[in-house]
Amino acid sequence: MQRLYERLHSRGLEVLAISIDALGAQVVAPFMQQYQLTFPALLDPQDRIPHLYHIKGVPESFIVDKRGLLVDKVIGPCDWSHPQILALFERLLAASVPDAEARDHASTAPTSTDAQLGAPYHEKA
């Protein structure tokens, strides 16, 4: 995931890690340093995220497009540098969102604050 982030962050990719570890920053900070992870890590020591997002396993990843719509949900480990995964993110980053559509969906796009508060993602109909 770090390689994906390094490769595509300058083009708009955001990665937010959410830790549900009860010990919070005490264990997350050393983990992030040990693996040299540079994307933000949010903390959920109260364990709200698993219930709000119906998490079935750890790790679990949500791929959200520019409009804030859920594109895919990945349960378990993933090779984020696999060519098919890179192609998916390249397509998502290249997609344009018309101004009117961006305005209409602006309130549904998750932010780092939403993740901290446990606001649900908005899935495609």
Image (tube, rainbow, N blue to C red):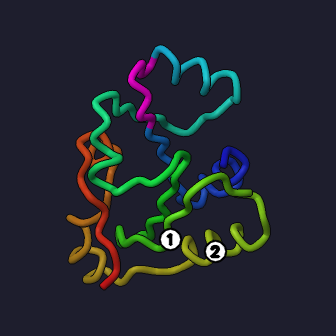
Of mark 2 and mark 1, the one earlier in the sequence is 1
C-beta proximity under 8 Å, tags 2 and 1: yes
Q: Is residue 24 magenta?
A: yes
Which residue is identified by label 1? 72
* Disc ID at residue 1: none
Q: Say which residue appears at 42% left-offset and 18% top-offset.
A: 23
Q: Looking at this view, name the residue that lies furthest to the front.
A: 56
| x, y percent for residue 5 | 64, 50
Quadrant in the picture for the C terminus: bottom left
Looking at numbered disc 1 in the image, what kind of residue is underneath it? Answer: Asp
Closer to viewer: mark 2 or mark 1: 1
Cα gap from disc 2 to disc 1, whole angstroms = 10 Å
Looking at numbered disc 2 in the image, what kind of residue is underneath it? Answer: Leu
Element type at mark 2: helix
Q: Is residue 76 magenta?
A: no
**Vertical order, 52 against 27 (above or below):** below
* Quadrant assignment, res 79: bottom right
**Vertical order, 100 against 114 (above or below):** below
Find the magenta span and give its range.
Answer: 19-25
| x, y percent for residue 25 | 44, 19
| x, y percent for residue 70 | 41, 70
Which residue is identified by label 2? 88
> What main secondary structure does the magenta stretch of the protein show?
loop
* Quadrant assignment, res 64: bottom left
- Taking the image as shown, residue 82 lies to the left or right of residue 53, namely right
- Taking the image as shown, residue 29 lies to the left or right of residue 78, namely left
Q: Looking at this view, name the residue that lies furthest to the top.
A: 26
Q: Say which residue appears at 64% left-offset and 34% top-offset.
A: 37
Q: Say which residue appears at 55% left-offset and 58% top-offset.
A: 75
